[in-house]
Amino acid sequence: MSLTLTHSAVEKLDSLIKEENNPNLKFRIFVSGGGCSGFQYGFTFDETQEEGDMVIDAQTIQVLVDSTSIKYLNGAEIDFVESLNGSQFVIKNPNAASSCGCGNSFAPKGDGGCSYA
């Protein structure tokens, strides 16, 4: 399993965890059904590693990925970008055939492109 976080993403996550004043927090990233392309990314902080979770050490941050999401995130890079439009985490995912304008949803390779209901 290969999942990387840029220096910018690690710095932002480290800052957010320090704000929560809980050194046991880990960054959880997951993929769930939904979004305009079929799947969407989700982020949360979690203290608990569940059975089947992959744990990735990214400098000072531990990243948790559940067993279902692993296949969609292999080889992805998570970055934190600040621009005139705001700041957000951005995922560069080689497993995504397409993504929609929001940048939070994607269609995995082998599926169709964006679809809107």
Image (tube, grey):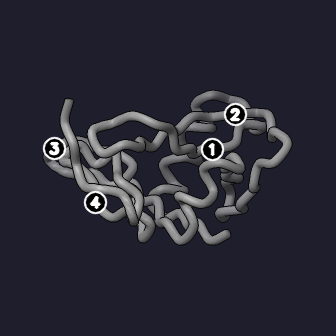
Q: Which residue is mark 2?
A: 46
Q: Residue at x 62, y 37 (%)?
A: 18
Is label 1 in contact with label 2 (beta carbons under 8 Å)? yes
Structural distance between the alpha carbons of marks 4 and 3: 22 Å
Check disc 2 and give the amino acid type: Asp
Is label 4 in contact with label 3 (beta carbons under 8 Å)? no
Give the left or right position of residue 117, taking residue 57 as reference.
left
| Location of the C terminus (image quadrant) | top left
Check disc 4 and give the amino acid type: Ser
Q: Nearer the viewer, mark 2 or mark 3?
A: 2
Q: Is residue 13 above or below residue 76?
A: above
Asked whether 67 or 48 is in front, the reply is 67
Q: Residue at x 48, y 48 (%)?
A: 12
Check disc 1 and give the amino acid type: Phe
The spot of residue 111 in percent (x, y) is: 36, 57
Q: Which residue is mark 3?
A: 85
Q: Which residue is mark 1?
A: 27
